[in-house]
Amino acid sequence: MEETADKKHILFVDDDQNVLQGLQRMLRPQRAIWEMEFAASGREALDMLDQKAYDIVISDMRMPGMDGVEFLTTVRKKHPHTIRFILSGQTSKEALIRAIGPTHQFLSKPCDADSLKKAIDRALNLRKILTSRNLISTISQIKSLPSLPTLYLQLESEMKSPVCSIQNVAAIIEQDVAMSAKILHMVNTAFYGFRQEISSIPQAVKLLGLDMIQSLVFVAQVFSGYQDQKVLTPFLDKLWKHSMSVSSLAKSIARTIRKDEAFLDATFKAGLFHDFGKLILITAMPRQFTDVLRMVKEKQIDFWKAEVEVIGTSHAEIGAYLLGLWGFADSIVEAVAFHHRPGISQSEHADSITSVYIANALDYEELSGESSTSGNDKIDIEYLRDLRVESRLAEWREISSREAFKERK
């Protein structure tokens, strides 16, 4: 029999024995690679967690005595490095708001075996994609990793509904007046190139599509959490503008490689989220973040290189780790993880990684007025040569210049 030491340990918690038995039957083929245990209450599960470490805990929401949110809140406090899922039939706004704090992912019942397996595998595979000891050490210093924004989860729930509509999605966004204004401001910038002014959320949803609107809500809500930190406003404004530029440019570059919409949308998201790890550093490691800023200024080195010197890893790996934990696709996670060092990726998602990497480098090139084939953070020509796309760099630089000109108009 295979040794259990190499297996991943997963704990399922539900007060309904029929549900637990169903999970056992449904996931029986995974017994060779997962060590699965089952608890009928939050109290029982906490006792089990005190006795043994688990990689993932998956809990129902509604349980007598101690419900799923209370249980996972305790898990977060006592076992902060355990990945926490809610698996529940409750999808109301109130339920999502309660679950958002202690939960890394919210999975809706009924959840078929394949969807559940993919969600678990994606979370576990983070350790394969991002195996740096320095990264794990840094993550362990962060007391509580943030959860997915509430509005994003509401939109995700609506988009899975069989009666999903543009009107329903728009109505969810319009509940938040500040978010509505932010979204309209974003879609009316030069990044999207609409000739007429977009004056309503339903119009924005219709023109951009559900998936892109959801992504914009995600990043806007993440950034809005830092608005009260006035001292960081100049840095955040610059980061916001850079993220928007890279997302648009990455998608334009990706379109020269492949045309399928799923690939283009994933690349857009990766460009939008690529510097998300910097926001984690600002709040979770402010002293080290200040040291990084000082080193960048004093040594005139690239931000990510200063991060590696100060904390042993970079915002790229930290952001990718969190996005993976939240269940974003591997192509997005890897494009974020390797957007400074694509040559070490050895990934099957090279097209997305390359598009975000080049977009990031060329956006900085436009800002500095210096070629990214020279200087500190120069483009890795050997990497492009290995992919046989070196000759396309001139075309991509022209696209970058065109988009930068459009933005300045």
Image (cartoon, grey):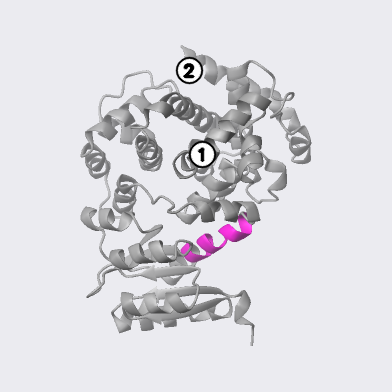
Q: Quarter-wise, where is residue 202 in the image?
A: top left
Numbered circle sitting on residue 204? none
Magenta region, residue range: 119-129
Q: Is residue 325 magenta?
A: no
Q: Image point 53% across, 34% down: which residue?
A: 290
Which residue lies most toward the top here?
Answer: 409
Which residue type does callout 2 highlight? Glu
Q: Quarter-wise, where is residue 7 in the image?
A: bottom right
Q: Image point 53% across, 20% down: which residue?
A: 403
Q: How many marks?
A: 2
Q: Which secondary structure class fits the magenta region best?
A: helix
| Camera-side mark, 2 or 1 | 1
Q: Is residue 77 left or right of residue 359?
A: left
Q: Image point 74% across, 34% down: which residue?
A: 380
Numbered circle sitting on residue 407? 2
Which residue type does callout 1 highlight? Arg
Q: Is residue 137 above or below residue 385?
A: below
Name the quadrant of the N terminus: bottom right
Residue 128 percent across, percent down from the top left: 62, 59
Q: Is residue 195 visible?
A: yes
Q: Measure how far apart labels 2 and 1 are at the Cα level.
A: 35 Å
Q: Closer to the camera, 396 or 340?
A: 340
Residue 113 percent across, percent down from the top left: 44, 71
Element assignment for label 1: helix
Residue 291 percent across, percent down from the top left: 57, 34
Residue 346 percent across, percent down from the top left: 70, 50
Q: Quarter-wise, where is residue 132 in the image?
A: bottom right
Would you name the residue on which mark 1 appears? 287
Element assignment for label 2: helix
Q: Closer to the camera, 85 or 349?
A: 85
